[in-house]
Amino acid sequence: MLRTAGIKIWMLTGDKLETAECIARSLQLGGGDGVWVPAARCAARRDALRLLQMLSARDPDQTNLIIEGETLEVCLRSYEKEFVEVLERCSGVVVARCSPTQKAAVARLLRARNHVVAAVGDGGNDVAMIQEADMGVGIEGAEGRAASLAGDVSVRQFQCLARLLLVHGRRAATRSAALCLFIVHRGLIVSTMQVHVSCHRQPQHQLLKRFLLTLCTICMY
């Protein structure tokens, strides 16, 4: 459902690569027809270049990449711009053996590329990533409430995420836009009325008392 809405899903986990791949396949995190491509470990700049060339030769829209955190860090340190462009076009991305610092760095990097990032986590190792994202969603689980307390929104189950983003998120955006327009229009109307009264009466005359403006603001919110 989230992919249908145009949302790309990246899974950042501390599990080993094989476990992460098994979970990603079972949950169908990538595109339906995409091929899961485990990335070879990179320890030097030349290894990162070979990986970048291999991924560039494939069709990114049909590629689901599985990469380890240390390999991703080496690739971003060597060829950040080129490698991020390839990752952005992949159908799905899974980062295994990813440390809390690396999770936060990925969220920060995507935000720097003008992407809107929603980070979802249920453990203490996800707190840094949740705080770096545009919207942090904490899930209350067996690992404690650290993630739910650090997030902007807290949910009890992962299955609530789709409704949170697609229903409540859309409604919140629409209502926030309407509220902003109301504030702008209210300011223009009050200012126009005050200018009109000042032109025909004494300039120091105040059309609306302060308590009326304060009362209007309180009622609006």
Image (cartoon, rainbow, N blue to C red):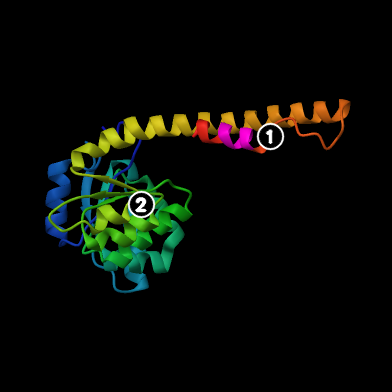
Q: Nearer the viewer, residue 195 or 88?
A: 195
Q: Is residue 133 magenta?
A: no
Given this view, does label 1 or label 2 mark the residue nearer the observer? 1
x then y, percent, for residue 123: 21, 58
Please state if 163 lies on the left or on the right of 199 as rendered. left
For the image, the number of numbered tags is: 2
How crowded pointer 1 is (Cα within 10 Å; few <14, some 14-19, many 20+) is rated as few
* Type of amino acid at the residue the image marks with label 1: Lys
* Type of amino acid at the residue the image marks with label 2: Leu
Q: Quadrant of the image for the N terminus?
A: top left
What is the secondary structure assignment of the residue under circle 1?
loop
Residue at the spot 38% in from the left edge and 53% down from the top edge: 133
Q: Which residues are magenta?
A: 211-216
Q: Using the image, tell me which numbered label, if any, was put on residue 87.
A: 2
Magenta stretch: helix, strand or loop mostly: helix
Q: Is residue 98 visible?
A: yes
> Which mark is first along the chain, 2 or 1?
2
Q: Quadrant of residue 106?
A: bottom left
Residue at the spot 24% in from the left edge and 59% down from the top edge: 146
Q: Nearer the viewer, residue 100 or 96?
A: 100
Q: Is residue 83 visible?
A: no
x then y, percent, for residue 166: 33, 32
Q: Nearer the viewer, residue 179 or 26?
A: 179
Q: State whether residue 198 is above or below residue 90.
A: above
Q: Which residue is mark 1?
A: 209
Q: CA distance from mark 1 to mark 2?
A: 57 Å
